[in-house]
Image (cartoon, rainbow, N blue to C red):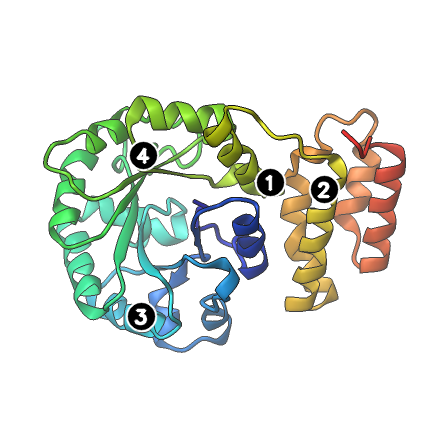
Amino acid sequence: MLAPMEDVTDRSFRQICREQGADMVYTEFVSADAVVRNIASTMRKMTISDGERPAAIQIYGRDAESMAEAARVAEAAHPDVIDINFGCPVKKIAGKGAGAGLLRNVPLMLEITRAVVNAVHVPVTAKTRLGWDHNSKNIVEIAEQLQDCGIAALTIHGRTRSQIYTGEADWTLIGEVKNNPRMHIPIIGNGDITTPERAKQCFEQYGVDGVMVGRAAIGAPWIFREIKTYLQTGEIPTITNAEKMALLRRQITESIERLDEYRGIVHIRRHLAATPLLKGIRDFRPTRIAMLRANTLEELSSILDDIERNFLTLDV
């Protein structure tokens, strides 16, 4: 599954990841308050095309009433699933009592979950973390309580809120939740799924029903093709540099079509900066800087042409 990521999992990227082998994708998370207020930029994030299904809309908020209303509005966009964000660690969200901030107010977390489940007819799932910090890893108990509220599946990121994205993800408690005899809903593991080998190990070692890929997919949507093929055949497929570059160019084009030339290029810079296709190239720094400063499609395309000619062997 493709994890929900702000400014990353737009409609184009979700579609590409589905084509590359992701079994399910998630929108960028949307604010319940913004949905209720009908903020145009937020409403656009909930547009789902048929080619990316099954797809989930993820919502976040800090009170049951607005979350229930936002869920009803989101349901009108016809997602396959509505997911509740109980895991976002960033200060502007968790610090205000939403996202992972609800790990410090479990009764409210459960109230919100019940309200959302009761508000809609599509399946409701949740995504959270191990706990607020090292001293409060209460995910085993929380998982049971969320299940009792009626969620259809639970995704667990193997870090606490305090860790943000630092250190290594700890899958031990994810496995404990999955192997809890009182749990009967699917458990999806998230955190540091960066290679096909790691994905397979997590399936085999922890028994999870699914794995969710987040940061490793940025600039590398082909990771889903690698993982799926490896799980099915034990072999990692050969994906040429030419294929990878073509996917990045497609992201650029579709980002510009969705926004405009300048904003589309700015939006896609995160993928260009992160892509493993351009990592470790000798004497690449000046070209990298120029690529990330380009403001027009003509300028960016010219730089990518130079990269293909001078830095990449496109048939390997």
Check disc 4 and report the residue beneath it.
160
Residue 271: % across, % down: 64, 46
CA gap between label 1 and label 3 equals 33 Å
Residues at marks 1 and 2 touching, judged by CB atoms closer than 8 Å: yes
**Given contact means CB atoms under 8 Å apart, are the residues at marks 1 and 3 in contact?**
no
> Residue at coordinates 25% horizontally, 48% vertically from top-left?
153
Q: Nearest to the eye among marks 1 and 4: give it.
A: 1
**Image quarter in which the N terminus is found:** top left
Amino acid on which disc 1 is placed: Trp
Earlier in the chain: of badge 1 and badge 2, it is 1
Q: How far apart are marks 2 and 4 (CA)?
A: 37 Å
CB contact under 8 Å: marks 4 and 3: no
Q: What element carries label 3?
A: helix
Name the residue carrying label 1.
Answer: 222
The residue identified by callout 2 is: 243
Residue that badge 3 annotates: 70
